[in-house]
Image (spheres, rainbow, N blue to C red):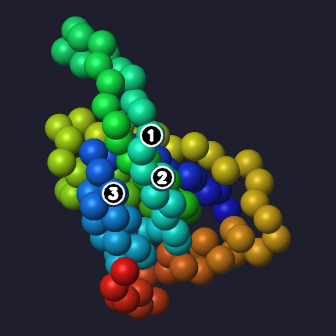
Amino acid sequence: MELFEVEVSCPDKDSARAIASACLKARLIACAVIMPKVESLFCWKGQIDSESETLLRMKTPAPQFESVCQMICKHHPYDLPAIVALPVQAMGPGVADWVESETQTAKICDGSI
């Protein structure tokens, strides 16, 4: 199974958590890692800018990528969220099976964080 690690920068931890929770509840991802206080440097509308942001990384099967993008765009406050999918070359024993199992739509994942 082909897996992606999808990452997107968010303005804060709350927005990253909201996106991750929505993706988990929809069974689009198996897990998320929220890394607060990263610095982003970028060009936007002809200007070089920098922001303190939170990086969100999520593991998902490749076929779920478009649905993950849609969910991110639905819950993200930015006009153009910078969504990147990185192919996972290898994982520890059993991890790929766990990701596949956790992203099955028949399962229920409705706990609160």
**Quadrant of the frame with the C terminus:** bottom left
Q: Secondary structure at mark 3?
A: helix
Residue type marked 2: Met
Q: CA distance from mark 1 to mark 2?
A: 7 Å
Point out which mark residue 13 bears. 3
**28 w.r.t. 76: above or below:** below
Q: Earlier in the sequence, mark 2 or mark 3?
A: 3
Q: Secondary structure at mark 2?
A: strand
> Which residue is depicted at the point 35% across and 41% down?
53
Work out whether 3 lies above or below 53: below
Residue tagged by mark 2?
Answer: 35
- Labelled pair 2, 3 in contact (Cβ < 8 Å): no
Q: Amino acid at mark 1?
A: Val
Q: Is residue 87 left or right of residue 79?
A: right
Which disc number belongs to residue 38? 1
Residue 41 visible within the image: yes
Picture quadrant where residue 1 is located? bottom right
Q: Residue furthest right?
A: 93
